[in-house]
Image: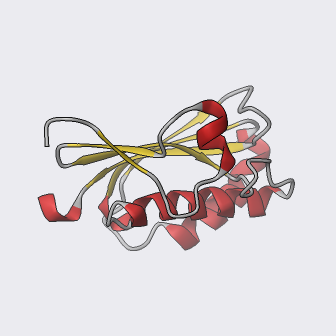
Amino acid sequence: MNQRQAIFPAERHALYEQHRYSAAIQSGDLLFISGQVGSRIDGTPEPDFARQVQLAFDNLNNVLKAAGCTFQDVVDVTSFHTDPEKQFETFMAVREKNIGEAPYPNWTAIGVNWLAGFDVEIKVIARLPQAK
């Protein structure tokens, strides 16, 4: 495949349409997933932080599934945090439930001052399983 192909989960949340972006783009044997946030189906942020983190992982897993992937296909992760010092322990506890077994992907965590009303965002690159 030489052209990019947009991938969307079965239940697209409102943010994709509101902000005009694809959930993921497949290019060759790689899948580039847009930053996933802990949004409810209407696009609004989940106010409870631990639940927001879990929803971000749920949204991420839904996009991976739509492309025929799992978290085990993820090779690189970037997470963005509005208050890393206060949020990190909760984030790591939720992350632990979602990342699966070793070997783990690369991971970079970045502190930011704004995520459009959200407290965390997770962006990944995965290799499509049929391309391994």
Compare residues 5 and 125 and report the one nearer the observer.
5
Where's residue 71, x and y in %? 40, 64
The total of numbered circles placed on residues is 0
x, y percentage for residue 101? Answer: 38, 73
Give 132 or 83, whichever is nearer the viewer: 132
Q: Quadrant of the N terminus?
A: top left
The image shows residue 90 at horizontal and vertical percentages of 73, 59
Is residue 36 in sight in this rendering? yes
Q: Judge from the rendering whether residue 34 lies leftward or rightward of residue 75; answer left or right.
A: right
Nearest the eye: 98 or 69 = 69
Query: At x 79% / y 47%, what residue is drawn?
Result: 44
> Is 52 situated above or below 86?
below
Please indicate whether residue 57 sits to the left or right of residue 100 in the image: right
Q: Position of residue 94 (x, y in %)?
A: 64, 65
> Could you tell me if residue 132 is visible in this image?
no
Left or right, 27 with respect to 49, comes to left
Residue 128 in which image quadrant: bottom left
User: Which residue: 79% across, 48% down?
Assistant: 45
Quarter of the picture containing the C terminus is: bottom left
Residue at 68%, 57% (x, y): give it.
53
In this picture, residue 64 sits left or right of residue 98 = left
- The picture quadrant where one finds residue 110 is top right
Determine the residue located farthest toward the right in the rendered image.
Answer: 47
Q: Nearer the viewer, residue 74 or 95?
A: 74
